[in-house]
Image: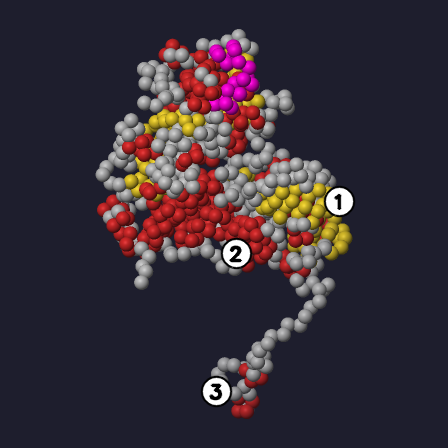
Amino acid sequence: MKVTIDGQSIEVAPGTTILQAARMIGGDVVPPAMCYYSKLKGSGGKCRCCLVEVAKGSDADPRPMPKLMASCVTGCMDGMEVNSKSSERVTEARKSVTEFLLINHPLDCPVCDQAGECDLQNLSFEHGKSQTRFIEEKRTFEPENIGPNIQLHMNRCILCQRCVQVADQLTDNRVHGVMDRGDHANISTCISKAIDNEFSGNMIDVCPVGALTDKTFRFKSRVWFNKPYNAHRDCDKCCGKTTVWMFGGEIQRVTGRKDEYHEVEEFICNGCRFDHKNVEDWTIESPREFEKDSVINQNNYTQKLEKVEIATEKNILLGRDEDRKKISMAEIPLNANNTNS
Amino acid sequence: MSQKILLDKINIPGIKTYEVYRANGGYASVEKALKTLTPDEVVEEVKTSGLRGRGGAGFPAGMKWSFIDKKSGKPRHLVCNADESEPGTFKDRYLMEYIPHLLIEGMITSSYALGANRSYIYIRGEYMWVYKILERAINEAKAAGFLGKNILGSGFDLELYVQIGGGAYICGEETALIESLEGKRGNPRIKPPFPAVSGLWANPTVVNNVETIAAVPWIVNNSGADYAKIGIGRSTGTKLISASGHIKNPGVYEIELGLSVYEFMNSDEYLGGMSSDRPLKAFVPGGSSVPVLPAHLIYKTAAGEDRLMSYESLSDGGFATGSMLGSGGFIVYNDTSCIVRNTWNFSRFYHHESCGQCTPCREGTGWLEKVLHRIENGHGREEDIDLLLSIQSKIEGNTICPLGDAASWPVAAAIRHFREEFEYHIRFPEKIKNRDHFVNEPFEKVKHLVAKQYI
C-alpha cells in the first residue's frame, strides 16, 4: 500500500497506522505522540497530539475525512494522502492540544526530575507559547504514596494511561488505575503503597512527563549532568540491557534503553533498575547515542563550542579592580592595616 | 389531535401490566414478525419507514441495522440505550415508567430483525424505580412466553437483561455504554471499529435509543410506508418532546414531526404558551447539547419560513441561525433567565461529566466552566468572551466522542446570539451580583448600556 505524508510517499504493509508510516519516513513529518507507545497494545488515541489531516481517504474512496484523525490509531489505506506538518489545521490543533495539556500542568520543571527528557517539554518547545491565557487556579491533587520505588506526582499527570497498560500487559496484577473522571481523573491505587510488582518500574520509563519518577534517583541530579552509557548484566528476570546514568564514577540511575521516540527497546526488571547501582554490577558497552537536539546533548564534545561573546561595555562584568578586592567600607582603604602598622 | 404512536395507550388504566397491555393489542408485532416475516423483511420495513435514531444524532435506524455484520457468524447483540441523562430530556423515563411493555415488545421484534439472541437494556442508575418496573415487565413477558427459548414456537430465542449504569452521562455514548456494559470504566472507544462490526464483547452490536425501539412495533404492525406518511420530508413519524422551562404545561408530548414550533408552543393541546406574562427570550430545542436560539429565530427561520419541529427545519441555517432537534429536550426561557448563568450551568455539567480520556475535552470543559463562572460572578474580563470562543473551537471536532462537541456548541451559540449579555455581565459586575439580576431588571431594559455607540 502506498501512503503519502506531506508529499513523501512510502510503501507500507496493510494494518500500519499513519503514525507508524510517518515514523518510517522520519524527520519533520512525524507527529508528536504523548500517549501512543508502540510496545503497548491498545495505547494511543487519547492525547490528540498526533492529529493529522487526511486529504484523500484512499484510491477507492478519495473523499477527505472531515475531522482531523488521530494518526496513531488510524490505519493506512492504499493511496491515502495525509497532511501532517504542512497543514495549517494540524499545526493549529497541535497548538491547542499543547495549550490544553499545559493549563493544568504545574510549571515546576526546575524541580522536576523529568525535566530534560520530558515529552511535554519537547512538545511545548515546538508547539507551545510562552504566555498563558489560563488565569484560573490549576487543579491539584493530594500527594499519594503508591509504593517504595515509584514517586507519583499526580499534578503533573497528563493521563496518557501508558502506565496502566504497562501494568496490564507486563505485570500479573494491576493494582493501579484511573479513578474519577474529567479533569479530576487521576492515577491512583486503591490501597496505598500497593505497587511493588517486579516489573512495575517500567511505569517510570513509559511516563511521558514527571508524574512517575524514580524514588532512588529523586533530586539526585539533573539528567543533563549525567552521562548515559549503554550497559548490561546477566539478569534472570529480564534482558539486562539498560542505560546507566553516571555522574563521575557513580551510577545514579538505571533505565531502559530508549529509542529516538523515547520508547524503551526492552522492558527491564526492578532488580536491575533500583537495586544494582554499583559500577561492578554492570558491563558498560558504550556511551549512549544522543538525539541531536536533546538537552543532554548540549555542550557535548562532538558539538562545536562557540565562545560566548557578550556585547557590552568593557569591564562591566569584570568590575573595577579595586571593587574586586573589596567593596564594603569604602572609606577605609584595603591595606589600611598595613599602613598603620 | 395528531396521531399518537407511542403514547396512544398511555392513559389506559393498568397498561403497565402484561394482561392489560396484551388485551389492548400488545405484542401483536412480535406475533406478526415471528410468524409471517423474515428478519430481513423487518429490517426492510424499518428502512422504508425512515425512522431516525431518537437519541440525538438522528441517524436512520434501518440503515444502522443493515450495517450489522451478519457474515462473521459471531453472536449479535441489540442494546437499548436507556441512559437518558441529557439535561432537559426525560421522554424515555416517561415511556419506560408508564408503558414498559412497549419497549420490551420493541426489543423482541428488533432483536428478531437483527438476529440477536441476547439483548440488553442499559438504564441509568438514577432510574432505579424504572429498572424495577422493567424487570417486572420482563418477568411477565417471560411467563407469557414472549421471552426465553423458542418464542411462540418460531425457534427464535431471546434473553433480555436490564443493566443499571453507575451514574455517568458519558455512558449514553454508544461505545462508552458498551464498555460499561462489559464491566469496564465507561470510556468511549476509538472508532473505527464501529459497534456494528465489533461492539459488545467484540461482537456485532446495534445500540438504539428507547424511543427508536418503541416505535418499531407500530411499524411492524402497520407498515414502514404508513409510518413514512406521518411527518414531513425526511423527518418521518412522531417524536416525543420533553418540554420544560417557563411554559404553562411542561411534560412529555408526542408530536408528529413537522408541527410548527409556534403551534407547539402556544396551542392548549401542547405547551399552552408561557407560564407568566414575561416574554419569551430563548429556547433550546433538543437538550442541553444543542445550540440555544434567541426569540427572533424561534418561530421563523432566518429565511423567513415557519420553523417546524423537524430535523431539517430546526437545523435550518446551520449553526449560525439554526439549532438541532437532538433528543427533544425542549427548554423554554423567559426574560427572567440569564443566558450566561444557563450556559455556565450547562458547562458545569459537561465539566463534571467529561470522562477525562482525551485532552481537549478533559482540560477544555473545565476551563470553559471556570471562565463562565467568573463572568457570571462579576469577575469577567473583556477578553474572556473571545477566549471562550477560542477554547470551544479548539475542543470542537478534536475529541474522541461527541461530548466535546456537545460541551462547546452551547457556549458558542450563547455567545453568537447573546454576546451583549456577556458584555453586560463583564462591564456591570455590580448589577449582576444579585443572583436574580434579570428578574427585576430584564436585559431589554438595560440593553442600551452595552449598545455600540456611533457618533
**Image: magenta residue range:** B31-49
- Residue A108's tag is 2
Image point 43% across, 34% down: which residue? B312
Q: Nearer the viewer, mark 2 or mark 1?
A: 2
Give A232 or B275, whichever is nearer the viewer: B275
SS category of the residue bearing label 3 = loop
Image point 54% across, 25% down: which residue? B65
**Residue sitting at the far front:** B304
Q: Position of residue B452 (x, y in %)?
A: 33, 57
Question: Residue type at mark 3?
Answer: Glu
Q: Chain of mark 3?
A: A
Can residue B280 be seen here? The reply is yes
Horizontal side of residue A164 vs B227, given as left or right: right
Question: Residue type at mark 1?
Answer: Asp
Image point 49% across, 33% down: which residue? B173
**Residue sitting at the far top:** B153
Q: Is label 1 on the same chain as label 3?
A: yes
- Residue A331's tag is 3
Q: Main secondary structure of the magenta part?
A: helix
Q: Is residue B205 above or below residue A159?
A: above
User: Alpha-carbon neighbours of circle 2 within 10 Å: few (<14), some, or many (≥20)?
Assistant: few
Q: CA distance from mark 2 to mark 3?
A: 45 Å
| Residue B45 on the magenta span | yes
Image quarter (top left, top right, bottom left or bottom right) of the N terminus of chain B: top left
